[in-house]
Structures are given as structure tokens and as C-alpha cells.
Amino acid sequence: MTLFNPHALRNQLQPSQSVLGIDPGSKQIGLALSDISLMLASPLTIVMRKKLKQMLPIFQELCTQHAIGGIVVGLPLSLDGSFGPAARAAHDWAKDLSERLNIPTCLWDERLSSSAVNRFLIQEADMSRKKRGDVVDKMAAAYMLQGWLDATIAS
């Protein structure tokens, strides 16, 4: 089930469940993981993009291994906030993933997450282009997931 209210996903989580953050790129997919207290997102890994049917065992294993109770998928809205072709594709992909894994999924605006991470890696970590390529997608997934965690924290 794909949820549009970010709080609805948090409310469905059971104690000791984590959330998987996914930044679906065209070539590789960045993955991040929350802690069970739902306070901190950490980069997890990247996987090469293939057809969802081929990637499903990877996601199933990750969900079992990390007690995933929900998934937050980055929604690449246009800079003006409109729902363009990339956002439609991410929405359809997230819906399909959610149905196949039987895990609730929420879409979260991830505009400029890769840019923010790249800027940080260049300015603060002085990282080369090659090294950035190895980490930017999973760090962008963590950046996006941290945004969701911060926005949905219980008040």
C-alpha cells in the first residue's frame, strides 16, 4: 500500500521496526536505514538498477534482515514542485514494490538531495568525483530518509 500521508506510515510501524529509505536512480539505487528509535538515518548500500522482478529478492532479504516495517521512496518532483515523468515513474515503482513486498510505502520529496550531498562531499570532505560516485546515492537516500524522520517525529 502506497501512503501519501507521511505520518500514516510512521503510525503503522511496530516497536523495533526500521524504515528503509530508497533513492531510485536511473542506474543505481541508493539505500538507507533508520534506527529502531526512528531518529537517525544511515547510508546502507547501493544496488544496480534492474527490472523490479530481478531486484525483488534483494529487497526481500534486506527487509527480513533489518526488520523493515515501512519504506520511504524518494519522489523526484520537478523544481517547481510539479509531478513530471520521473515522479510518475517513481510513484509507479514504489507502488509496485510496496504491493510485491506487502510493506507500506510512502513517497517523500527528494528534490536536490543528490545536489546537497554532492556539495557536502566536495566542500566538507574534499572527496574526488570517483569516490563521490561510490557513496552519493546511498548518502542521498539517508539525507532523504532523515528528512522524513525529522518531519514525522512525534510531538
Image (tube, grey):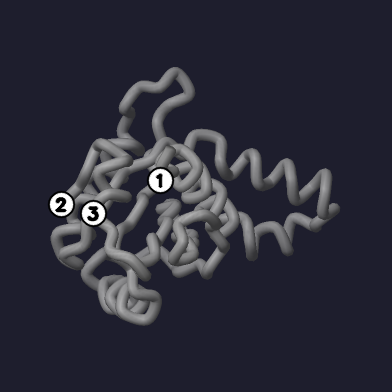
Badge 1 local density, few (<14 within 10 Å), some, or many (20+)? Answer: many
Identify the residue at image location x=21%, y=62%. Answer: 103
Determine the secondary structure under disc 3. helix
Most extreme residue toward the front, as rendered?
155
Report which quarter residue 13 is drawn in: bottom left
Report which residue position mark 1 lands on.
74
**Callout 3–callout 2 Cβ contact below 8 Å:** no
N-term mark: 3 or 2: 2
Identify the residue at image location x=53%, y=68%. Answer: 44
Residue 31 showing in the rendered view: no
N-term mark: 3 or 1: 3
Residue 12 shows which numbered tag?
3
Q: Position of residue 25 (x, y in %)?
A: 44, 52
Residue 135 showing in the rendered view: yes
Asked if residue 107 is positioned above or below residue 54 in the image, the reply reads above
Report which residue position mark 2 lands on.
1
N-term mark: 2 or 1: 2
Q: Position of residue 32 (x, y in %)?
A: 49, 61
Residue type at mark 2 is Met
Residue type at mark 1 is Gly
Residue type at mark 3 is Gln
Asked if residue 9 is positioned above or below residue 36 in the image, the reply reads above
Identify the residue at image location x=46%, y=47%. Answer: 149
